[in-house]
Image (cartoon, rainbow, N blue to C red):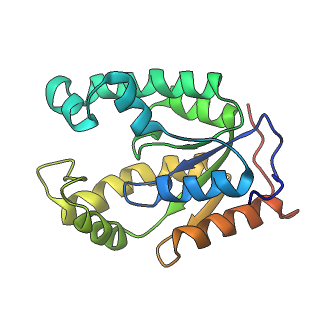
Amino acid sequence: MADSSPLPAESGLVLIGYRASGKTTVGRHLAEKLGRSFIDLDAEIERRAGRTIADIFEDEGEPAFRSLEERVLREVCREHPGVVVATGGGAILRESNRCELAKFGIIVWLSAPAEVLVRRLRLDAQQRPALTAAGLVDEVPQILKEREPSYRELADVIVDCSARSPEDVAELVVRMLRSPELALKERR
């Protein structure tokens, strides 16, 4: 049963964070709790492109994927106000995406240390191969270090998801959204 939403109807909720931080699973739980629709941005990109993200990367390269991601993100934000959106881990790389997300609604960063993310990625290695030739153990800390400032700057709410179940993370986010102490950053 959906809780009454602590967010205005037009305000979206966005989950950001590194791969395997739980954005999709937590997003589904949050959408249910808030009585909102849910969109997984990576799944939406694949649906619209008619192929997997891995295929897009392989056939066209990362710049082409990032351009497609930017377009789909912009369309989702403008066509679906008030939904819960789980972004891909690198969606925050482009300034235009960060601006679009900031206008869309509340941004929750699902944070976890590199070693937790590596462990999770290894459990799902066939679905989530390494992004670089360095391999997961070297790649994750490096990319996380590069992206962390953008995650931190963009986030209204930061939740350490390393030792919590997705259900517990969703419940914590809802409690945080209802908290009068939550001081949201001024939006442009």
Work out which quarter of the rendered image holds the C terminus and state it. Answer: top right
Residue at 59 percent of width and 66 percent of height: 159
Work out which residue is located at the far left of the displayed protein and give it.
Answer: 133
Where residue 175 sits in the image (x, y, percent)? Answer: 76, 67
Q: Is residue 138 left or right of residue 116?
A: left
- Tell me if 165 is positioned left or right of 119 in this view: right
Q: Residue drawn at (31%, 27%), measured in percent from left and top?
A: 65
Indicate left or right for 113 with 159 as reference: left
Q: Nearer the viewer, residue 46 or 110?
A: 46
User: From the viewer's perspective, is residue 74 above or below residue 133?
Assistant: above
Q: Is residue 172 left or right of residue 129?
A: right
Q: Is residue 145 above or below residue 103?
A: below
Answer above or below: position of 179 versus 8: below
Picture coordinates of residue 44, whole percent (x, y): 44, 32
Q: How many marks?
A: 0
Image location (x, y in percent) of residue 156: 68, 52
Which quadrant of the figure has residue 173? bottom right
Kindly identify the residue that appears in the image at 35 percent across and 67 percent down: 114
Q: Who's the residue at 39% across and 23% down the image? A: 48
Which image quarter: residue 176?
bottom right
Q: Residue furthest front?
A: 1
